[in-house]
Amino acid sequence: MTLVCDGEKRRKAGSGTRERECFRDLGQKNADAEQFKAILAAEIIKALDREGLTLRAAHGRTGIAAADFSRIRNADLGRLTVDRLMSILNRLGSRVEVKVRVRRAQPVEE
């Protein structure tokens, strides 16, 4: 997965410090949550590709609407919550493990 942030291509969601800051760089209020959703969506896409599942086949296997898989493939994650994305991954046979580290926020430079 390649993210484009401020016109600069990034390797993978969550693969390094700059990549994790992409949503923050764009001024997103919930940058951490948006990044987490992007990482979960990327994992869902990997699972679909690995299994060779079409949107309809994914719907048949999981009971999740094909429209939701289409939104994920198109990175239209606004309607999807973190718990919904985690549930989709679970239904595709993946287990989600989350580690949380809380740090002080860095002051925003303007």
Image: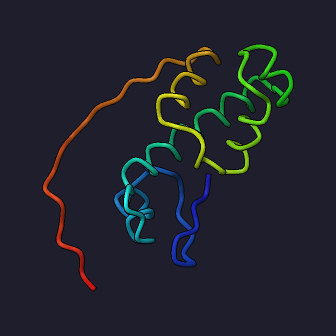
Name, please, the residue furthest toward the bottom.
110
Q: Which residue is drawn at 55% across and 31% down?
A: 85
Quadrant for the C terminus in the image: bottom left
Q: In this view, does 106 lie to the left or right of 17?
A: left
Residue 104, given in percent of the width and then of the height, sits at 13, 56
Indicate whether 24 appears above or below 94.
below
Task: Residue 80 in the image: state x and y as whole percent.
Answer: 58, 39
Residue that extends furthest to the front in the rendered view of this protein: 79
Q: Which residue lies furthest to the left in this view?
A: 104
Total labels: the figure holds 0
Q: Where is residue 30 in the image (x, y as percent from the top left)?
A: 38, 55
User: In the drawing, does residue 42 fall left or right of residue 83?
Assistant: right
Occupied quadrant, residue 36? top left
Q: Position of residue 65 (x, y in %)?
A: 75, 27
How is this picture coloured? rainbow
Front one among 30 and 51: 30
**Residue 103 vertical position relative to residue 29 in the rendered view, above or below:** above
Q: Which residue: 60% across, 43% down?
A: 79
Q: Which residue is drawn at 24% across and 81% down?
A: 109
